[in-house]
Image (cartoon, grey):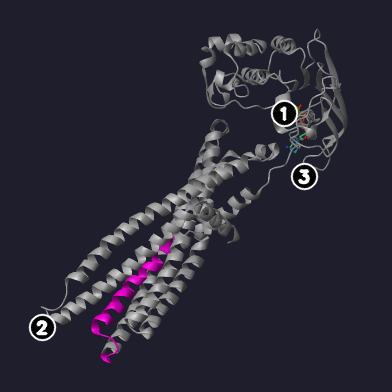
Amino acid sequence: MRHLWKILMLIWRAEQVALLRGVALSITVLVMGLALLGLSGWFITAAGLAGLLGLGTTFDIFRPSAGVRFLAIGRTAARYGERLLNHDATLRALAALRVRLMQALAAQGWERLGRLRGSEMLNRLGADVDALDGAMLRLAIPAVAAGVTLGLALVVMSLLTTPLLAIASVGSFTLGGVLALIWVTMRARKPSRRAGRAVQALRIRMIDLLRAKADLAVMGRLAGARASTLAASARLDAARAASDAVEHRANGRLGATTTIATTIALFLGVMSAREGLISAPQAALGFFVMLAVAETLAPLRRGLTELGAMLDAAARVDHLLGDTPEPRGHARAVRPDPMAPALEIADLRYRYPGAAAPVVDGFTLRVQPGEAVALMGRSGSGKSTVLHLAAGLIAPESGTIRLAGRPLADWSEEALRNHVGLLPQRSTLMRGTIAEALRLGAPEASEADLWAVLEVVQLARVISERGGLDANLAEAGAGLSGGEARRLALARLLLRRPRLLLLDEPTEGLDDATADRVMTGLRDFAPRASILIATHRLPPAKAAWRIAAMA
Ligand code: ATP
Ligand code: MG
């Protein structure tokens, strides 16, 4: 509940004025409905009595009938305005919430971002925010409007009929209505939660199915994955049907409450009229107003049916909003010292969260300015981890890392990213043209620059045969061979001209001749850059590479 309240407050603060107007119009709609039925009831009865008593010539039928028409049309107009304003305000607030969520997600540390599943992110931004749109529209606003209108109905009925009639009828309706709504809330909570979970599962499975379709097909698991996706869909349908059933039964309960309350109003009205406390038209007014009072609580039914899913979604969204990104550096403008070692790692120790033993322990390495070093070691010895530590993506448990003489922690994120270029072991190419892929980190690069880096990684011929820089890459770089995609990612990095290059297996998947040419080209392209590569392959003999071994 606390989380939902926080989200409601967020929406409220973002769109106060529009929502206030919307609530005012919601109340107007309900009040006009009461007035319309009350006035009509009074009018019909009074007109009938006037006819019976032969007072037809003196009875004023014009003003009440004008009032009825005004209320009927005004109510429709107010309803239209209310729908427009409340939906507009809520949807705008939710759009802003989506942006904030996206920012919170994007500000996560590199480690957590890497672990996030795309489908989960989609669920947070899509299904969860969607679930919350009812919180304002179908819960908070109708609740406020219903409370105010019931209070008004009580006061006005007391004045126009008798206080006893007003309290007995409005009071019994409110009591019965609230009980019915509590019943809905309790009954619908489980199916609503189940529906919420099923929506999430359906999305996750659907995306996994699409993503891994090739693997699933070769493993012969495509049918199984499809069946489990369909099962989630069936669960969703069943949960929704259960929610709907609860809502229908709640409808019956609210109807019964209305019948009881109107009967009380009718009975007390007739009694009071007999005793001469009120006139017969006043008694009719009380009865008809009670018929309209039913409209106050009815809209809450739907919102309360969805409460379970809303609470779950609110908790997840609030949790994500509250996540503070891991702070990095003091954003000071450090000045690199060109004479100091390009990279100096001393006594480094790092343990992955939850791991029993550190992967890197007591590791020391120095790369001089302009030096090229190959970091070698068996698979799993921690080469990639060292590169990630040096790039400031993860923080060491102990030990020091200095870049160009300055402690890593002193670098601002922007300066650090400009200075260091990391080629991860698995890099991703996005959909788009070759030129777009290359310009990811260097939007200003000219076509000549693009061709120059393609030449370094031995891709110029392949790309020109494929249709040049405007050739399209399919999803995740499909359309290039594994080694070509890898070299394109390397070219993209070189284009940024970082002073320190950290390359994780840049020649993986290449034949010896191409690998040697890429390594030599790399050195020639950036003769003054300092280079550290993690690799299993001995660098070409003629280039001056120093070999460092992982423990
Ligand atoms: P390779 O030559 O196969 O690329 P590597 O030397 O680059 O290996 P790392 O990727 O640094 O090895 O991994 C070192 C060890 O840390 C491995 O045993 C690996 O299982 C573990 N490891 C890597 N990433 C994580 C992670 N995110 N969480 C937990 N353990 C991890
Ligand atoms: Mg590795």
Q: Which residues are magenta?
A: 274-302
Label 3 lies in ligand 1 vicinity (Cβ under 8 Å): yes
Amino acid type, residue under disc 1 in the picture? Ala
Q: Mark 1 vs mark 3: which is more N-terminal? A: 3
Q: Secondary structure at mark 2?
A: loop
Percent coordinates x, y for residue 331 in the rendering: 74, 35
Left or right: 352 in relation to 6: right
What residue lies at 24% left-to-right and 67% top-to-bottom?
68
Q: Can you say whether 493 is above or below 70 in the image? A: above
Q: Marks 2 and 1, Cα distance to the nearest angstrom?
A: 95 Å
What residue lies at 57% left-to-right and 44% top-to-bottom?
100
Q: Can you say whether 307 is above or below 279 in the image? A: above
Q: Secondary structure at mark 3?
A: loop
Label 1 lies in ligand 1 vicinity (Cβ under 8 Å): no
Residue that numbered label 2 is attached to: 54
Percent coordinates x, y for residue 84 in the rendering: 38, 52
Where is the N terminus found, in terms of image quarters? Answer: bottom right
Residue that numbered label 3 is attached to: 354
Percent coordinates x, y for residue 356 in the rendering: 82, 43
Whether the magenta-drawn stretch holds residue 281 is answered as yes
Amino acid type, residue under disc 3 in the picture? Gly
Q: Which residue is at the front of the view, 234 or 420?
A: 420
Percent coordinates x, y for residue 501 in the rendering: 74, 21
Instruction: Name the image quarter holding residue 457.
Output: top right
Q: Main secondary structure of the magenta part?
A: helix
Left or right: 345 in relation to 509: right
Q: Marks 3 and 2, Cα distance to the nearest angstrom?
A: 93 Å
Whether the magenta-drawn stretch holds residue 480 is answered as no
Mark 3 or 2, which is nearer the eye?
A: 2
Amino acid type, residue under disc 2 in the picture? Gly
Residue 200 in view of the camera: yes
